[in-house]
Amino acid sequence: MLYYSRGSKTEAITRDQIREALAEVFDAIGTRRKVLAIPPDYTRLNSYAGPIIGMVNDYFGERLTDVMPALGTHSPMTEDQIASMYQGVPLGKFRVHDWRNDVVTVGTVPEEYVSEVSEGRVSYTWPAQVNKLLLDPSFDLILSVGQVVPHEVIGMANYTKNVFVGVGGSEGINKSHFVGASYGMERIMGRAKTPVRDILEYARVHFIPDLPIVYVLTVRAKDEATGELVTRGLFIGDDFECFEKASALSLETNFIMVDREIRKCLVYLDPAEFKSTWLGNKAVYRTRMALSDGAELLILAPALKEFGEDPEIDRLIRKYGYKGTPHTLEATSANQDLRDNLGASAHLIHGSSEGRFKITYCPGPGMTREEI
């Protein structure tokens, strides 16, 4: 069901309007005794999820008992990050998602279905995994909050990705990323319906139909007049329609179409957000489709200090490097450590130039030339 839908390419939805919309929806769905919120982590600071969770906390008060940021494989948020992003929400309500140890497999997507939607590029079963906290029957409302924005793995971020990846398990995350990478980023980016999304939607319909999840999705963009980020869209619902509407607006709002291929591109990685190539290689895969063969990509990364945010992923990136799809698929086939971490394999593919253009990383003192 779609509870709320508002947005356009030119709209700027205000804080008060968002607060009113949330109250309208919460009033409509009726009294809830115990609420779990799943917002993004600090890497999605611009999502407006921080103020939204503050509004949720204002509305439900003590009934909002748990807030579990959807870390995926990212590092846990620090207390300073929580205080900065989620102002006014008590620190004691926050829980850390442990993607290796705190997950439960709620079902398995058949190999035949995975092979069908990936056009035969991948043939394995996919485990639908979620943090065990979501399965606590005392929760009568689970709020999944976040921003719909183009995403290299799944086409458009958020919705069921926040559940099965954001608070999902190691195997599910790795295998879903590998499906996307094998299928091809250029065929996925910016699309609401993709092989990875199909797999997650299969899991939602078949394995968690009774979980009381409501999705609160924003679409954000920079206002050309003021230079400030504004909320162009707000969509609240409990099924695919909500996400589909948000994706359509994000496609209009968050893509820049160029009239010619880019020959030289400079990307600056904000030191408050980008300390690893695991995150910083957005500079590669968010420009790759616009760069010409033989182009030069310069990446200014003053806070870079590591490759992977997880120690094992960091080791794998250092070992295998960003060498393109054929090399990475061959290395994955030949090496158990990559097969055990298919998310790392997918990342190595996404973060590569595929041999088409030159990448020059310019880090600060936290990373040496030799490491690069």
Image (cartoon, helix red, strand yellow):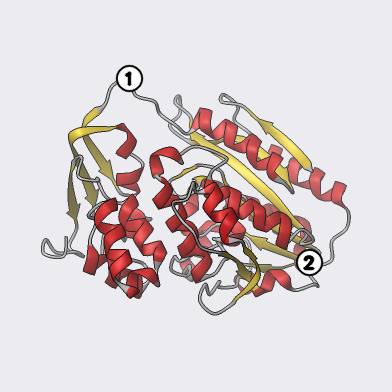
How far apart, in angstroms, are the residues tagged by discs 1 and 2?
51 Å
Amino acid type at circle 2 is: Arg
Residue 286 percent location from the top left of the image? 36, 41
> Image quadrant of residue 35?
bottom right
- View extreme (left): residue: 370
Circle 1 SS class: loop
Say which residue label 1 marks.
Answer: 259
Q: Image point 30% across, 49% down: which residue?
A: 269
Query: Foreground: 311 or 80?
Result: 311
Look at 79% across and 67% down and name the residue there: 34
Residue 72, position as x, y percentages in the image = 50, 64
The front one of 57 and 103 is: 103
- Percent across and percent down for residue 335 are 29, 72
- Viewer-proximal residue, 162 or 231? 162
Disc 1 residue type (three-letter): Asp
Asked whether the viewer can see residue 62, the reply is: yes
Above-or-below relation of 326 to 174? above
Of mark 1 and mark 2, the one earlier in the sequence is 2
Q: Please identify the quadrant where the C terminus is shown.
A: bottom left
Proximity of marks 1 and 2: CB atoms separated by less than 8 Å: no
Instruction: Check disc 1: other Cα within 10 Å, few if <14, some if 14-19, many if 20+.
Output: few
